[in-house]
């Protein structure tokens, strides 16, 4: 992410050409890997096999795209909307486990937890609820924007910007953050990701994008050509049959 942002700034100043979208996709994949690693390192040892499975899946998808020469930006446009749904639902698992809540508060949105040691109710920020609603709003927004996207990777950038902004704000309320010195690891990573994504979105908004470069349009064009070819062959075969029948009748 930082490398893509730096090269983007250099490109503005020195007019150097570089593939910003590829660099951002690579940075996003790497940041997801670090995020999963950070969650595992919270307890030093892996608590569950599922944590390793998720981390392995992220790495596996990146390797698969490189081998099959699939555009990472196109794949991310597709799967990151699903990420928002998964994160929206997954946060309610935090609620069931009485975890990932925020600091004590008297807000009308407060969540009450019964402390079995003190025998009293304590009220905290329901950060799981904040993030769940934020992800739901992001999914709806990006779903409608996906119908008007101008280039591959635009929805992925929107996801990084939206989720990064929400996570950076909400993470500041949580009490179980992983720290690196005085900094919350997830909060810093989310903020940097958001700034990088917004910068690239702004840069791309001033560029001209040909709709033909969208993979979905390229696939649709190929399918149209196949259909037209099949129809032309059918018409040709029918013409040959008609000529054959006419010749037979004349004889």
Image (tube, rainbow, N blue to C red):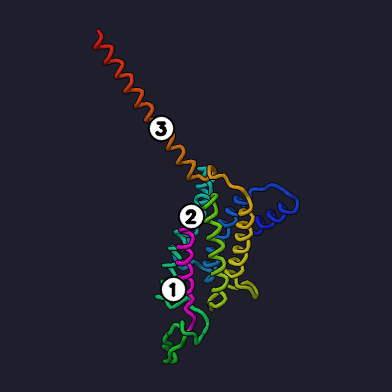
Residue drawn where x is 34% and y is 27% of the image:
234
Say if 165 sits above or below 222 in the image. Answer: below
Task: Name the residue at 54% across, 50% down.
Answer: 150
Q: Answer with the quarter of the image where residue 9 lies.
A: bottom right
Sequence-earlier tag: 3 or 1: 1
Residue 113 visible in the snapshot: yes
Label 3, secondary structure: give it. helix
Q: Which residue lies furthest to the top in this view?
A: 251
Magenta stretch: helix, strand or loop mostly: helix
- Would you name the residue on which mark 1 appears? 94
Q: Position of residue 149 (x, y in %)?
A: 52, 52
> Camera-side residue: 84 or 150?
150
Position in image of residue 117 (x %, y %): 44, 89
| Nearer-the-camera pick, 167 or 30 | 167
Which residue is identified by label 3? Answer: 228
First of labels 3, 2 by sequence position: 2
Q: Where is residue 85 in the image (x, y as percent from the top left)?
A: 43, 63
Magenta stretch holds residue 137: yes
Question: What label does residue 246 carry, if any?
Answer: none
Position of 103 relative to 202 (above/below): below
At 54% from the left edge and 71% from the top edge, which residue is drawn? 42
**What residue is rendered at 66% in x and 57% in y?**
5
Question: In the rendered structure, which segment of residues is drawn in magenta?
Answer: 124-145
Rendering quarter of residue 3: bottom right
Q: Mark 2 points at which residue?
A: 146
Q: How far apart are marks 3 and 1 (CA)?
A: 53 Å
Q: Is residue 138 magenta?
A: yes
């Amino acid at each position: 992410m930082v490398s893509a942002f730096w090269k983007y700034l250099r490109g503005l100043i020195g007019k150097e050409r570089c593939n910003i979208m590829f660099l951002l996709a690579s940075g996003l994949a790497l940041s997801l890997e670090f995020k999963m690693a950070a969650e595992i390192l919270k307890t030093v040892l892996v608590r569950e096999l599922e944590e390793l499975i998720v981390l392995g899946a992220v790495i596996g998808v990146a390797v698969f795209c490189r081998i099959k020469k699939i555009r990472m930006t196109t794949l991310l446009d597709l799967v990151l909307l699903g990420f928002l749904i998964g994160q929206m639902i997954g946060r309610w698992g935090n609620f069931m486990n009485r975890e990932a809540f925020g600091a004590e508060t008297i807000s009308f949105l407060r969540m009450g937890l019964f402390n079995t040691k003190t025998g009293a109710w304590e009220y905290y920020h329901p950060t799981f609820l904040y993030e769940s609603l934020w992800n739901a709003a992001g999914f709806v927004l990006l779903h409608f924007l996906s119908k008007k996207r101008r280039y591959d990777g635009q929805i992925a950038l929107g996801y990084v910007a939206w989720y990064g902004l929400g996570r950076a704000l909400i993470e500041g309320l949580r009490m179980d953050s992983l720290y690196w010195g005085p900094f919350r690891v997830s909060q810093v990573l989310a903020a940097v990701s958001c700034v990088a994504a917004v910068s690239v979105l702004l840069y791309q908004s001033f560029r001209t994008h040909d709709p033909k470069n969208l993979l979905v349009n390229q696939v649709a064009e190929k399918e149209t050509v196949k259909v037209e070819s099949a129809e032309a062959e059918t018409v040709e075969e029918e013409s040959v049959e008609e000529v054959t029948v006419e010749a037979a009748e004349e004889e």
